[in-house]
Image (cartoon, helix red, strand yellow):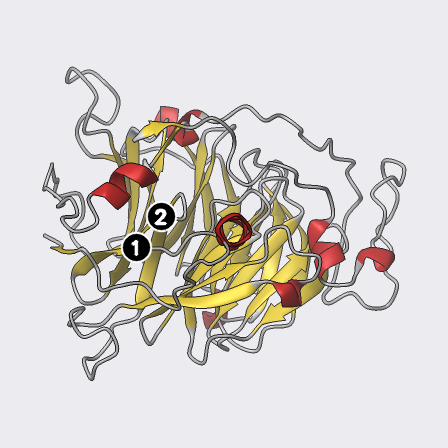
Amino acid sequence: MKRRTHRYGLTGRSLRRWEVMTNWADDVIEEEADEGEEIRSDGDVLGEVTGKVRKKSITTDNTIPYEEQWETDVEAYEARKSNPPSTQFRQCAQMHTDWVNDMLLCNHNQTLVTASSDGTVKAWSPHTHGHSASFHEPTTVGMHADYVRCLAHCREQQWVASGSFDRTIKLWDLSLASPRNEPLITLNPPESSGPKSSIYALATDPYGSVVASGSPERVIRMWDPRSGRRVGKLVGHTDNIRAILISEDAKYLLTGSADASIKLWSLSSQRCLHTFTHHTDSVWSLFSSHPALEIFYSGDRSGLVCKVDVESCADVSEGECIVVCQDTEDNGERYGSAGSEGINKIVAMDDNLLWTASGSSSISRWRVPPRRAVRAAALSAEGAVDSPLFSPPPWTTMPRE
């Protein structure tokens, strides 16, 4: 590892990049309306919008967040390509009595928060010192009346949102964790008694300005976490919403659905800007560390993981979509006859390494091809560069306890 010198994905980035790439730039609804002005549509809005326009200040802070201050040393990995480093077991804890459905890191990556089918949300800080430290032992943050399916973390406000099959979204203050902790607020869908109101996906931005939720209702609901009110919904998918990402400035949303599509939305205009159709099976997971989501990964039920890279493109058609890997029960057979349990979770680091978790009880690590812009620069400098269509078999497959 080495210390990062600049924020990932911010260099040279201009505003409204997605509108330009998807040819919606001339139709952007300006955000310079007076405070309290009603939201208006030009007739091409997908979904219903309620509430008032809130003027947002666009952050230009290039300070690297603590969680992002270190990056992988690509040169060191290249030097060890023939003998890649192995993964070693560090520590574990029995935190739940049923399946763990989601997990995330918070508190400067020191605290692990998990959501389980046993109806609880728990936190654990394995590296804290002293038994009096918070979460030194696994601690119950809160509870739902049914399976807890997904989590989202607000970095600046220090709360965690949990979505459950009990059809509620609850926000928890980690500093108040206790077995009888009450949520900061509970968000209820309009038809909370319906079976299709179960929450399958959640996302929020680092500043907690908006929460997005997905469910079998086939709509994405937008919430104001401060008031608990629904502020809009996005309509366009034809099946369950399984994964959601929000850009750092809360202007864009990516949604993955069981209808095998991924949609990019503008939250300013409440409009679908583009639909990605490179998957042929249900999209189960999304991941991006790019502030504007211009590079993202997606995993589907068949085990395929794809990478979309449109960074620095003038048009989305100039970008690329590549198959990174296919996670199967036997990862030694990359595209063999082995079955797949689907990609439940993706984590990538610095466009260098990628981890996948599936129902096969293993976590696999993969090499990721360099970014499109990096390869283009190498092509310009050296005259030739390889452009791999997929990664080699995983370096390691780590069985889960």
Asked if residue 250 lies left or right of residue 356, the reply is: right
Query: Relative to residue 67, is residue 153 depicted above or below?
Result: below
Q: Disc 1 marks which residue?
A: 367
Q: Which residue is at the front of the view, 361 or 21?
A: 21
Count of numbered labels shown in the rendering: 2
Mark 2 is on which residue type?
A: Asn
Q: Which of the marked residues, 1 or 2, is nearer the chain's N terminus? A: 2
User: Which structural element holds mark 2?
Assistant: loop
Q: Residues at badges 1 and 2 in contact (C-beta under 8 Å)? A: yes
Query: Relative to residue 183, is residue 336 depicted above or below?
Result: below
User: Which structural element holds mark 1?
Assistant: strand
Q: CA distance from mark 1 to mark 2?
A: 6 Å
Dot 2, crowdedness within 10 Å: few (<14), some or many (≥20)?
some
What percent of the width, then of the height, locates residue 190?
60, 60
- Which residue is the extreme one toward the front? 383
Mark 1 is on which residue type?
A: Arg
Q: Which residue is at the front of the view, 362 or 52?
A: 362
Taking the spot 26% from the left edge, 59% from the top edge, the residue there is 357
Q: Which residue is at the front of the view, 145 or 297?
A: 297
- Which residue is the extreme one toward the bottom? 337
Taking the spot 21% from the left edge, 49% from the top edge, the residue there is 81
Query: Relative to residue 196, is residue 338 depicted above or below?
Result: below
Q: Disc 2 marks which residue?
A: 352
What percent of the width, then of the height, locates residue 77?
26, 42
